Amino acid sequence: EMNRLGMMVDVSHITDSAFYDVMDITEAPVVATHSSCRHFTPGFERNMSDDLIKRLGKNGGVIMINFGSTFLDSSSQSSMDKVRKEITELIKEKDFEAGSDEAEQFRTEYFQNNFKFSTVEKVADHIDHVVELVGIDHVGLGSDYDGVGPTLPAGLKDVS
């Protein structure tokens, strides 16, 4: 029905199984508006595997690389888990009221000083990987500036 209406199908938030279901029935190219390559983040199912990217390319679709550090780099994913746990423990230790301005300021500062941010070079690595798999016509920038919160990589904190 989406094909008939001229709507693009976004496969960024679906499972691998659902992706293959979409690919089996779509008559139009699909887009992954804000995903990255699972090749660099094994086990991070939100990103696309090489097989998914190849199928997307065969369909004429585009994967648009997400700039969130945890989408780009396994070490950032590990850092996220560690820092979140530390923040929760420290907020309790400091007896901050949950959700208070004081707790939120602490959370923001601690995160900025302790999280392992990815780099603009990692974004380029993801782009290069897609180009190697399916060609330049099937990769774009899907920054997700409004969705990845404070995890944007060094060198890409904003559009400037």
Image: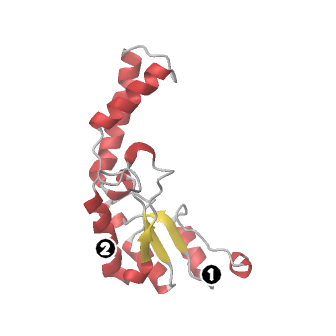
Dot 2 amino acid type: His
Q: CA distance from mark 2 to mark 1?
A: 25 Å
State the image quarter where residue 108 is shown.
top left
Quadrant that contains the C terminus = bottom left
Q: Position of residue 98 (x, y in %)?
A: 50, 21
Quadrant that contains the N terminus = bottom right
Please identify the residue farthest to the front as the structure is shown.
Answer: 160
Q: Position of residue 16 (x, y in %)?
A: 50, 68
Q: Position of residue 51 (x, y in %)?
A: 40, 76
**Horizontal arrangement in the rendering, residue 19 relative to residue 108 (left or right):** right
Return the residue at label 1. Answer: 26
Please identify the residue farthest to the top as the structure is shown.
Answer: 95
State the image quarter where residue 78 is shown.
top left
> How many labels sit on residues?
2
| Badge 1 density bin: few <14, some 14–19, many ≥20, Cα 10 Å | some
Q: What number is the disc on residue 142?
A: none
Dot 1 amino acid type: Thr
Is 16 or 142 nearer to us in this picture? 142
Q: Is residue 88 visible?
A: no
Return the residue at label 2. Answer: 129
Name the residue at 29% across, 47% down. 117
Q: SS of the residue at dot 2?
A: helix
